[in-house]
Image (spheres, rainbow, N blue to C red):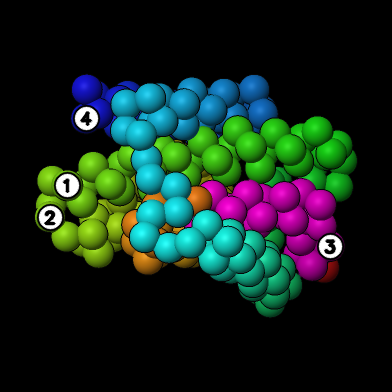
């Protein structure tokens, strides 16, 4: 059952990104519902641990802190790379330019449906299932991270792929450290909310 949910979730996310990249579909109406359903199914079939072996307050503090650092690093990276790499600059604008027009409701939707759904599915379900099958939590985190990156490739957007590479590594590492999903949820939600509240598009603009 868990394996079937993982396969279906991966396929659904690939299709969603394809629709966004090829047909101009909205992330809000395409990817967000897919991730919300994937996260809900992860809770039902996998029952992921929250804080794991660490205290709740600690994983929340670490998650919020890493999410904030990741946000700052993203802005700095775009500010440096954007003016020197036209394609990356264009892709960053395509994703983040709309951030300035997003309403608070969109920020909540993204931080909730997208960030939490992704973490419950990838770190709470997929990474934990891989750990059970492989027998090594660290190896499972790496395999789950690679899968996460591959699923984001159909976006055909360098900024999205870079976020999957760096963010996915951070979120997987947090889940591995705590043996739970709460730290990665806090980190991902913090990063997403900050990216919408303070979009880095100004840094990417020449």
Name the residue tied to disc 2. Answer: 135
Q: Could you tell me residue 85's position as x and y percent?
A: 63, 68
Q: Report helix, strand or loop for mark 1.
A: helix
Q: Residue at x 22, y 22 (%)?
A: 1
154 lies above or below 198: above
Residue drawn 41% across and 30% down?
A: 43
In the picture of the structure, the residue carrying the numbered disc 1 is 132
Q: Provide the secondary structure element on which disc 2 rests.
A: loop
Residue annotated with mark 4: 3
Mark pair 2, 3: CA separation: 45 Å
Instruction: Decide which of tag 3 and tag 1 comes sooner along the chain.
Output: 1
- The stretch in magenta equals 183-205
Give the quarter of the image for residue 168.
bottom left
User: At 63% across and 62% down in the image, what residue appears?
Assistant: 64
Mark 3 lies on a secondary structure that is helix
Q: Is residue 114 left or right of residue 17?
A: right
Q: Which quadrant of the structure image shows residue 2? A: top left
Contact? badges 1 and 2 (CB < 8 Å):
yes
Asked whether residue 82 is in view, the answer is no
Which residue is nearer to you in this view: 103 or 63? 63
Precedes in sequence: disc 2 or disc 3: 2
Residue at image mark 3: 202
> In 3D space, how far apart are the residues under numbered discs 4 and 2 (Cα atoms)?
16 Å
N-term mark: 4 or 2: 4
**Horizontal arrangement in the rendering, residue 122 relative to residue 88 (left or right):** left
Front of the two marks 1 and 4? 1
The disc, 4 or 3, on the residue closer to the chain's N-terminal end is: 4
Where residue 80 appears, x then y in whole percent? Answer: 68, 77
């Amino acid at each position: 059952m868990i394996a079937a949910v993982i396969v279906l979730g991966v396929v659904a996310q690939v299709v969603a990104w394809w629709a966004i990249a090829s047909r101009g579909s909205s992330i809000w109406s395409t990817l967000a519902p897919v991730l919300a359903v994937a996260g809900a199914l992860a809770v039902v079939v996998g029952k992921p641990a929250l804080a794991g072996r660490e205290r709740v307050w600690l994983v929340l503090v670490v998650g919020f802190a890493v999410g904030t650092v990741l946000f700052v690093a993203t802005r700095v990276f775009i500010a440096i790379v954007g003016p020197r790499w036209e394609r990356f600059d264009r892709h960053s604008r395509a994703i983040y330019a709309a951030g300035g027009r997003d309403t608070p409701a969109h920020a909540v939707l993204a931080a909730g449906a997208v960030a939490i759904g992704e973490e419950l599915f990838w770190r709470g379900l997929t990474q934990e299932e891989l750990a059970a099958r492989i027998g090594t939590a660290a190896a499972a985190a790496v395999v789950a991270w690679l899968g996460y990156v591959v699923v984001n490739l159909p976006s055909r957007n360098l900024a999205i792929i870079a976020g999957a590479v760096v963010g996915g590594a951070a979120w997987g590492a947090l889940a591995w450290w705590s043996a739970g999903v709460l730290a990665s949820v806090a980190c991902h939600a913090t990063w997403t909310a900050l990216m919408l509240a303070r979009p880095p598009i100004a840094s990417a603009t020449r």
